[in-house]
Image: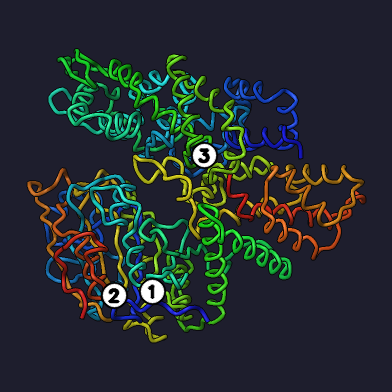
C-alpha cells in the first residue's frame, strides 16, 4: 500500500465520502495540495438526474423528496467537499422539516453558496434564510413583541457558545433582527401545507425586511453600541475571538477528529490565525486544516466515528449502487435514519451528537447489515472493479493472506488490527485459496465479495 | 440460558409495553365529547357523528373504529388519562417527542426515561435484552449511557447478515464478527465501547433469533405493522429472556389532512392489535404481569383546518392491562374558546405523573430519579 494512496484515501473520507481506487490514483497523480485546492473550488456538480429521482419518489411529499434529493446529489456529485460542507452546515445550523421542503432545498443552495466564503457572510445568509427564519420563529420577532429564539441561538449554538455573551447581549441581538421576516408569510404557510412538489411546489420562499417592524434604536452588543441591525450583528460576531475559535473547532471536530488533544489544539490555533488573516474566509481555514501536519498525521487517521450519512453515502458511492430514492428504509435516507441520522430531522436545534454517540446496538446492526449487503454483491460496479483489480495483480492466484491484504488495501486502505486480520484470515481460509485466473470464476469472485463484506462489518470500518 | 435479570424493583415479573402513536394522535376524535356542542362547531368538517361513536358514558365515546378498545374498557382494563401534556407546549413533533422521551420539558437531554428505568432494573447491565425496541431506529426514550438495548426491525429476520443465505457462511461470518468485536471490547476509548456494543448486539441477536421457534399461539394477528410488532413483542416476552421493557411505534398520526379517513384507519389497526396482544398475554399467562402505555407527542388543534387538524398540545394517553384500574383519570379539558391555549386544549395533567405511577406502582422503583422530580400520580393500578 503506498503512503500517497493512504493519505489521499484519508483526505477523501473526510473532505468527501470516500473514493474508489481509480479516483485515488487520479488525485494522487495530481498531488495532495492540488487535490485540496480542487476540493475547495467546486465546479459543475454533474448530472444527478433530479427529474428521474423525483419521478421515482412519487407519492412522497415535498419534504420527503427533499431528503431523498439531497441523498441523490451526495451520491452523484462531482464536488464532494461542497456536499460535505452542506452536511456540516446542516449539522451546525439544523432545521427540522415542517412542511417546507422547498425552503430546505433552497437552504442547501444557500449553504453551498457560502460554504467557502466569509463566516460573516454565512451568518448573514443564515439570518435571512427562510427555513431558518421559520424554524426559529424570527418571523414572530417584532419591534413591539420580540421573539428571542433566533437571537439566542445565533450567539449560543451557531457562532460563539455559552459564556461568551450576556443575557442582555441576547436581547439586543434579537432586537437587531426585528422586522427580518418571510415575504408573504401567510400565503406561504397555506402553500406549504399543500405539500406538493412539482410543478406547484416550487414556492418562492424569500426573505423580507420590514423597516416599520424593525427596532432601529441604539443597542449595546458585545461591548459595542449603535443602532445595529442584523448585518451589523453578524459583523460584530465574526470578529470575536470566541467566534473564530468556535467555527474553527467545529470544523476540526467534523473534518479532523472526534477529540481535541494538545496537538489538535495547536492545529486549531493555526486555523484561527488563518481565519483572521483571510478575513474570516472558510476556504482558507479549511485549506489550513487539510494541509496541516496534524490532519496528515497518524493520530488523525480513523479518529472519527463515521456519521450514518457518511457511512451510507460512502458505501453507495464505492459500490456504485443506486438505491431507489424515496423507497422508505430501502432508500439511502431511510437507511441512514435507521442508523440514527435522518436528514432535516435532527433531534433538536443542537443538532446530532456525533462521535461515540452514533454507536448503539440497534444502529450498529443496521450499519453492518446495510453496508455488508452492498459489498457482498459481486456484480455491483464498484465491487466488480475491486475484484478486477485483484484479478490483474499477482497472476490471479492468492493465498488467503494475500487475498486479505489486497482486499483491505483496495477497499480503503483500511488499517486493521492484528485480531481483525486474524479473523478475516480465518474466514478466508475456510474457503481455501482464491484463483481468479479463470475469467468466469464466479465462485472465486463471490468469495472475494464475501471477504469485502466482512471487512465492512469490522470495528475498524466504522471509523473514518 | 440467557442471563437472568437483575431483580431491582419489587415486582421482577412485571413488564411494560409502550406503544408510541407517532405524529400527534387526535384527542377529540379518539375520545369523542359527543354531547358537547363545541365539538361540532370546531370540528365542522371532521367530527364523528353521534350515531357512529362508541359511547362510554353520557358525554364521552371512543371513535368509531376503536371497538376492541371499547371491549377492553368494558372489561375494566383501560385507563383513559385526560388532558395529558406538559407546561409550555412545543408544537414541533421532534422536540415534543423528545420531551416525552426524556421527561425533560425544559433542558435538552440525551437520556431516555425508560433508559433510566432499565438502569434501575438491571444496574449492572447483565441482560442485553432488558429492553427491546421493535421497529426501525432506537427511540431516545430507551437511550442511556451504559444501558444495552436491543432494537429489532423484524424478529423473523433479525440479526446480523440476514441476507446471507448460506448457513455455514453465515456461521463463519458471525464467528468472525464475535471475535473481532470481542477483541475490540478490550481496547480503550471509543474502540472499546464499539467492541462492547457489537458484542452485546450479537449476544442479543443470538438469543432473540430463538424466540419465533419457541412461540406457539392460537391468536391470529392482522398483517399490518403494529400487529406484527406486538406479535414480535409477545414472542420475545413469552420466550422468557428476562425482557422487561418493550417499545414500539405506530404511525403516522400527523393528520393535517385525512382526520376522517386516515385517523379511523389507524385506530382500526391499533385497537385490534392491542386486543389480540392482550388475548395472547392471557393465553400465555402474562396478562397479570403486563401493562401497556399508549401515548402520543401531542393532541391536535381544536379547530379543524378543513379535512384535518394542525399540531396541538393537550392530548390523551391510555393504559391497558388486567391490573390497570380501568376508568377516567383527570378531566377532559374545556372546549370553550376562552379556555384554549393558543387554539389548543389546555393540558391539565403532567405526563410525568403517569410515568411516576408506572415506575413506582407498577415496577416498584423510586420515580424521582426517573422523572427528575415529584409529580402527582394517579392511582392507576389495582
> Label 2: chain?
B
Q: CA distance from mark 2 to mark 3?
A: 42 Å
Residue B20 in picture, x, y percent from top left: 35, 61
Q: How crowded is the residue under tag 2: few (<14 C-alpha within 10 Å), some, or many (20+)?
A: many
Which residue is label 3 attached to? Answer: A257
Q: Residues within 10 Å of mark 3 (few under 14, many from 20)?
A: many
Quadrant position of the N terminus of chain A in the picture: top right
**Residue B291, position in %: x, y?**
31, 75
Horizontal side of A323 relative to A61 (left or right) equals right
Q: Are marks 2 and 1 in contact (CB under 8 Å)?
A: yes
- Residue A116 position, x and y percent, is 50, 21
Left/right of residue A208 with respect to residue A91 in the rendered view: left
Rendering quarter of residue B276: bottom left
> Is residue A26 visible in this depiction of the protein?
yes
Task: Give the chain of mark 3.
Answer: A
Place of residue A241 in the rendered image (x, y in percent of width and height, measured from the top left): 35, 23
Q: Is residue A138 left or right of residue A75?
A: left
Instruction: In this rendered view, identify the residue nearer to me: A316 or A254.
Output: A254
Residue A395, placed above or below residue B114: above
Rendered position, A129 above or below B292: above
Residue under the image location 10 percent in, 47 percent down: B337
Chain ID of residue with mark 1 = B
Q: Given this view, does label 2 or label 3 mark the residue nearer the observer?
A: 3
Q: Secondary structure at mark 2?
A: loop
**Which residue: 67% across, 25% down?**
A32
Sequence-first tag of 2 and 1: 1
The image quadrant where one finds the C terminus of chain A is: top right
The mark found on residue B244 in the picture is 1
* Viewer-side residue, A230 vs A184: A230
The residue located at (47%, 65%) in the rendering is: B150
Q: Residue at the front extreme? A: A262
Q: Mark 2 highlights which residue?
A: B363
Amino acid at each position: 500500500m503506498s503512503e500517497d494512496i493512504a493519505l489521499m484515501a484519508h483526505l477523501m473520507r473526510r473532505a468527501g465520502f470516500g473514493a474508489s481506487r481509480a479516483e485515488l490514483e487520479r488525485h494522487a497523480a495530481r498531488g495532495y495540495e492540488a487535490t485540496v485546492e480542487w476540493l475547495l473550488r467546486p465546479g459543475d456538480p454533474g448530472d444527478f438526474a433530479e427529474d428521474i429521482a423525483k419521478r421515482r419518489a412519487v407519492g412522497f411529499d415535498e419534504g420527503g423528496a427533499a431528503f431523498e434529493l439531497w441523498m441523490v446529489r451526495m451520491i452523484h456529485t462531482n464536488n464532494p467537499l461542497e456536499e460535505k460542507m452542506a452536511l456540516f452546515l446542516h449539522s451546525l445550523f439544523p432545521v427540522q422539516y415542517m412542511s417546507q421542503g422547498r425552503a430546505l432545498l433552497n437552504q442547501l443552495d444557500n449553504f453551498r453558496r457560502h460554504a467557502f466564503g466569509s463566516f460573516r457572510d454565512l451568518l448573514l445568509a443564515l439570518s435571512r434564510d427562510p427555513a431558518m427564519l421559520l424554524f426559529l420563529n424570527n418571523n414572530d420577532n417584532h419591534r413591539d413583541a420580540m421573539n428571542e429564539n433566533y437571537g439566542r441561538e445565533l450567539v449560543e449554538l451557531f457562532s460563539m457558545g455559552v459564556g461568551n455573551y450576556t443575557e442582555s447581549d441576547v436581547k439586543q441581538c434579537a432586537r437587531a433582527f426585528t422586522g427580518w421576516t418571510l415575504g408573504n408569510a401567510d400565503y406561504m404557510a397555506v402553500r406549504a401545507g399543500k405539500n406538493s412538489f412539482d410543478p406547484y411546489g416550487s414556492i418562492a420562499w424569500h426573505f423580507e425586511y420590514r423597516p416599520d417592524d424593525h427596532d432601529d434604536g441604539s443597542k449595546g452588543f458585545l461591548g459595542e453600541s449603535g443602532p445595529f441591525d442584523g448585518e451589523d450583528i453578524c459583523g460584530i460576531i465574526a470578529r470575536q475571538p470566541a467566534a473564530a475559535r468556535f467555527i474553527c473547532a467545529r470544523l476540526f471536530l467534523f473534518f479532523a477528529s472526534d477529540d481535541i488533544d494538545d496537538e489538535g489544539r495547536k492545529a486549531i490555533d493555526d486555523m484561527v490565525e488563518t481565519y483572521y488573516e483571510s478575513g474570516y474566509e472558510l476556504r482558507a481555514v479549511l485549506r489550513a486544516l487539510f494541509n496541516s501536519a496534524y490532519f496528515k498525521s497518524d493520530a488523525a487517521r480513523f479518529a472519527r466515528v463515521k456519521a450514518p450519512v457518511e457511512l451510507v453515502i460512502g458505501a453507495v458511492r464505492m459500490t456504485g449502487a443506486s438505491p431507489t430514492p424515496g423507497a422508505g428504509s430501502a432508500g439511502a435516507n431511510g437507511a441512514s435514519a435507521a442508523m440514527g441520522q435522518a436528514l432535516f430531522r435532527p433531534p433538536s436545534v443542537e443538532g446530532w451528537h456525533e462521535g461515540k454517540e452514533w454507536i448503539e446496538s440497534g444502529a450498529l446492526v443496521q450499519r453492518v447489515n446495510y453496508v455488508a449487503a452492498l459489498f457482498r454483491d459481486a456484480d455491483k460496479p464498484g465491487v466488480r472493479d475491486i475484484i478486477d483489480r485483484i484479478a490483474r495483480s499477482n497472476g490471479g492466484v492468492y493465498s488467503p493472506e494475500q487475498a486479505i491484504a489486497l482486499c483491505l488495501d483496495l477497499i480503503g486502505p483500511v488499517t486493521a488490527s492484528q485480531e481483525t486480520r486474524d479473523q478475516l484470515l480465518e474466514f478466508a481460509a475456510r474457503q481455501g485459496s482464491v484463483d481468479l485466473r479463470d475469467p468466469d470464476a464466479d465462485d472465486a469472485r463471490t468469495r472475494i465479495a464475501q471477504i469485502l463484506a466482512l471487512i465492512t462489518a469490522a470495528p475498524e470500518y466504522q471509523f473514518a | 440460558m440467557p442471563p437472568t435479570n437483575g431483580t431491582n424493583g419489587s415486582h421482577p415479573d412485571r413488564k411494560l409495553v409502550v406503544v408510541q402513536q407517532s405524529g400527534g394522535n387526535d384527542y377529540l376524535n379518539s375520545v369523542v365529547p359527543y354531547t358537547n356542542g363545541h365539538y361540532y362547531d370546531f370540528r365542522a368538517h371532521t367530527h364523528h357523528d353521534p350515531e357512529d361513536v362508541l359511547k362510554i358514558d353520557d358525554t364521552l365515546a371512543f371513535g368509531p373504529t376503536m371497538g376492541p378498545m371499547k371491549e377492553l374498557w368494558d372489561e375494566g382494563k383501560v385507563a383513559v388519562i385526560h388532558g395529558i401534556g406538559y407546561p409550555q407546549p412545543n408544537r414541533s413533533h421532534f422536540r415534543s417527542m423528545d420531551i416525552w422521551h426524556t421527561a425533560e420539558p425544559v433542558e435538552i437531554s440525551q437520556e431516555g426515561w425508560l433508559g433510566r428505568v432499565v438502569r434501575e432494573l438491571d444496574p449492572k447491565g447483565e441482560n442485553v435484552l432488558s429492553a427491546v425496541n421493535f421497529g426501525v431506529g432506537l427511540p431516545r426514550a430507551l437511550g442511556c449511557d451504559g444501558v444495552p438495548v436491543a432494537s429489532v426491525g423484524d424478529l423473523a429476520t433479525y440479526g446480523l447478515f440476514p441476507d446471507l443465505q448460506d448457513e455455514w457462511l453465515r456461521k463463519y461470518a458471525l464467528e468472525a464478527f464475535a471475535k473481532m468485536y470481542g477483541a475490540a471490547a478490550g481496547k480503550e476509548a471509543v474502540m472499546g465501547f464499539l467492541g462492547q456494543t457489537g458484542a452485546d448486539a450479537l449476544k442479543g441477536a443470538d438469543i432473540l433469533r430463538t424466540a419465533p421457534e419457541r412461540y406457539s399461539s392460537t391468536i391470529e394477528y392482522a398483517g399490518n405493522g403494529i400487529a406484527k410488532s406486538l406479535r414480535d413483542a409477545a414472542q420475545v416476552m413469552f420466550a422468557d429472556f428476562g425482557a422487561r421493557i418493550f417499545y414500539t411505534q405506530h404511525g403516522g398520526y400527523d393528520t393535517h389532512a385525512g382526520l376522517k379517513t386516515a385517523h379511523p384507519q389507524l385506530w382500526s389497526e391499533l385497537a385490534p392489535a392491542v386486543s389480540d396482544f392482550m388475548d395472547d398475554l392471557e393465553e400465555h399467562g402474562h396478562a397479570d404481569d403486563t401493562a401497556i402505555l399508549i401515548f402520543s407527542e401531542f393532541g391536535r388543534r381544536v379547530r379543524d383546518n378543513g379535512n384535518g387538524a394542525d399540531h396541538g398540545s393537550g392530548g390523551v394517553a391510555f393504559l391497558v392491562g388486567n391490573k390497570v384500574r380501568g376508568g377516567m383519570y383527570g378531566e377532559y379539558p374545556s372546549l370553550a374558546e376562552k379556555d384554549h391555549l393558543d387554539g389548543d386544549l389546555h393540558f391539565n395533567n403532567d405526563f410525568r405523573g403517569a410515568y411516576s405511577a408506572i415506575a413506582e406502582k407498577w415496577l416498584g422503583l423510586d420515580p424521582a430519579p426517573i422523572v427528575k422530580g415529584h409529580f402527582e400520580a394517579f392511582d392507576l393500578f389495582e
